Structure formats: C-alpha cells, structure tokens
Amino acid sequence: MKTIIANWKMNVGSRESVALARGVLLALKGKKQLPDVVVCPPHVALGEVRKIVARSHAALGAQNVFWEETGAFTGETSTRMLAELGVSHVILGHSERRRLFGETDEAVGKKIVAALSAGLVPIVCVGESSTDNAREFVATQLRGALKGLHLRHKERILVAYEPVWAIGTGVAAQPADAVSMHAFIRSLVADLLPGVKASQVSILYGGSVDGANAYAFLREDEVDGLLVGGASVKLSEFGKILEAAVSVLEARAA
Ligand code: PEP
C-alpha cells in the first residue's frame, strides 16, 4: 500500500480547506487502485473538512497535538479532542515544530504515546539538516522519540523521513538516497520496537515532492508513501501526485 499525506500547514483557512478536500475527493473518483490518503488541515478547519471526507476514502489528520488529556494548557489540543473530531492521524515532530517551537525528541515521544492511546496513528517526522550526519542524526531522533514504546497488536506508526534541507526548498532528495535511508530507518525501528510487525510500520518520504518527482519515489518498495507540504495546497500538482500513486498501485495489481 502507498500512503499520501497532505500537510496544508497554516496555509489555508476553513473555506479553502473545504475546497481542497473536495478537490482531493474528485481526483480520487473512479480510480480502481487507491492509495491511502490523509488530509491534514489546520486545527480550525478540522470540523468542516470532516464533513467533506466522512464516508470517503480519505482520512483526516491533524498537524500537531499535546500529550496531556485535559487541563490548564491554554492554546493546546488533546488527542481525545482530535479523536472526537474524527481525526485518525496526527503529524508529530515536524521540523517546523522542532525549529520554531522547540519541540524535543522527548516531547515527540510523549505525543506518540498519547496519540496511540487515543487510537490515533502518529506520523513521526525525522530528518537531518545539511550539516548533520544524516544517519546519526535520524537515529538519535528516533531513539529519543521511540524510547520505551511498545506497540500493541493493532497499533501502527508512520515515520516520515523529511530531510530538513529538502522541505519547501524545491530540492528533493535523490530517490536512491531516500531508499537507503528508509531501509536504515526500518531496521532501526525494528530494533527499537521489539516484536513489531512490518505491517505496523510505514516509512514515508517528504521534502519538495511534486507532480514531476512523485512517481520516482513511489515506485520504490522502500517508500511506503509521501508526506507533501507545498504541493498539497495546489490541487493540480497534488492531483498528479495521486495519479503517480494510482499508477504504481495499478502496475502492481496487473
Ligand atoms: C513538509 O512540510 O512536511 C513538506 C514535506 O513540505 P514540502 O513538500 O513543501 O517540502
């Protein structure tokens, strides 16, 4: 299976989110082989977008969450509140949250635990900047975030490998480099989460994915899907990314 996640960031309000969600559903219409699609609007648009994606093939994701269940945490949102809104996935540890809001691996770890216990699928973002040793850096992030975690039978986790230098820059990683990093992440996660089944862990690539390069990533078995930022708010571009996923899935089914 391939999973395509649209991270609309703080780029659209409720009205535009609804229009985008409608466009995504339209782009999926009539396709026989569908990727899993998750749209992640800003929190304020979740309620409206839920009405559009309910009973459709697309799932609803949030861009962040806090780990406490309730209390005096002005401005924060709990996992239970998200679940109540029909949210099934949540992006955690995005590089923008780490850089701009000081989110640490430990905080990401607490959010993962909270998300799983509320029945949400965490999408854990990791990735190095251009000056880091990529494997060392990503390994440290994953060790910090997954420390002490035990995935129960039906729980799933998505890891999005998003090199920071590729996010929003127009310079994507080479698919071969992403493949090698995904294989590294997959074996590290298997070590960190003893007993975890392959079906419980998906590794996605993110960073300047667009309609022109999506297929080159998606055709790789190591790439379970894509996390898309900028191109996800341009319907024509996102439509091409969905098409790329559909062609890969159709070729496999043939
Ligand atoms: C992201 O922010 O997660 C991302 C991948 O952004 P972009 O696709 O714009 O590089």
Image: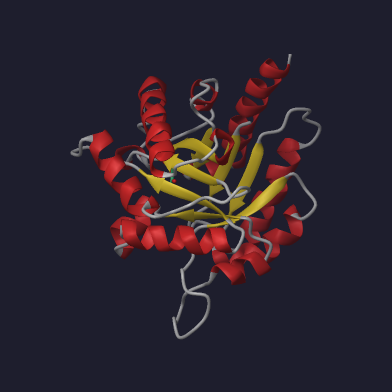
Residue 128 can be seen, yes or no = no
Colour logic: secondary structure
Q: x%, y% of residue 30?
A: 81, 32
Q: x%, y% of residue 246?
A: 67, 27
Quarter of the image with the C terminus is: top right
Relative to 23, residue 84 above or below: below
Q: x%, y% of residue 50?
A: 71, 60
Ligand 1 rendered quadrant:
top left
Quarter of the image with the N terminus is: top right
Residue 107 found in image quarter: bottom left
Q: Nearer the viewer, residue 18 or 101?
A: 101
Number of numbered discs visible in the structure rendering: 0
Q: x%, y% of residue 5?
A: 56, 43
Residue drawn at 68 percent across, 59 percent down: 49
Relative to 233, residue 108 above or below: below
On the rendered structure, is 193 left or right of 16? left
Query: Which residue appears farthest toward the left when viewing the image?
Result: 131
Q: Nearer the viewer, residue 183 or 173?
A: 183
Residue 14 found in image quarter: bottom right
On the rendered structure, is 138 left or right of 239? left
Relative to 89, residue 84 above or below: below
Residue drawn at 41 percent across, 63 percent down: 110
Residue 92 can be seen, yes or no = yes
Q: Nearer the viewer, residue 17 or 221?
A: 221
Query: Which residue appears farthest toward the bottom when viewing the image?
Result: 72
